[in-house]
Image: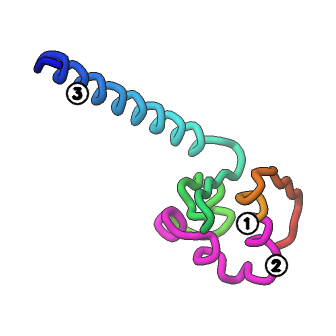
Amino acid sequence: MDRREGRADGAMDRRDRRAADDELARLRALIAHAPTLFALMEGPEHVFHLANPAYLRVIGRGEGDVVGRPFRAVFPEGAGQGLDEILDRVYADGEPYIGTERPV
């Protein structure tokens, strides 16, 4: 590979990264304005990655209190109510859980 190819690959990587960042920004804007509650958790600890303003309003917490923190740390009062077990099961088997009007 000569220097020109290396520079072209580097430029392509930057363009790809910029395109991915732009796409993520559009997704975040869409979620922020969604007319529903939305939160995205990742990993076995169910760490909040995103939470839209509607979700944050309903749970009565700010983004800094939620994003980047595990479910059990955000909702210690949820222990014993079965919610963390539901999240564990969904994470383990990938099967969705749909709960409607579930008291917490």
Q: Nearer the viewer, residue 64 or 13?
A: 13
Do residues under tags 1 and 3 come within 8 Å of each other at their CB atoms? Answer: no
- Packing grade of label 2 (10 A; few <14, some 14-19, many >=20) is few
Residue at the (16%, 22%) spot, across then down: 7
x then y, percent, for residue 95? 81, 51
Kindly identify which residue carries mark 3. Answer: 10
In terms of secondary structure, what is the magenta stretch mainly? helix
Label 1 vs 3, first from the N-terminus:
3
Q: Which mark is residue 96?
A: none
Query: Outermost residue, front direction?
Result: 1
Label 1 vs 2, first from the N-terminus:
2
Label 2 vs 3, first from the N-terminus:
3
x then y, percent, for residue 3? 11, 20
Please state if 93 lies on the left or on the right of 41 as rendered. Answer: right
Residue at the (35%, 33%) spot, across then down: 17
Residue 84 is one of the magenta-drawn residues: yes
Kindly identify which residue carries mark 1. Answer: 88
Q: Point out the image quarter for the C terminus.
A: bottom right
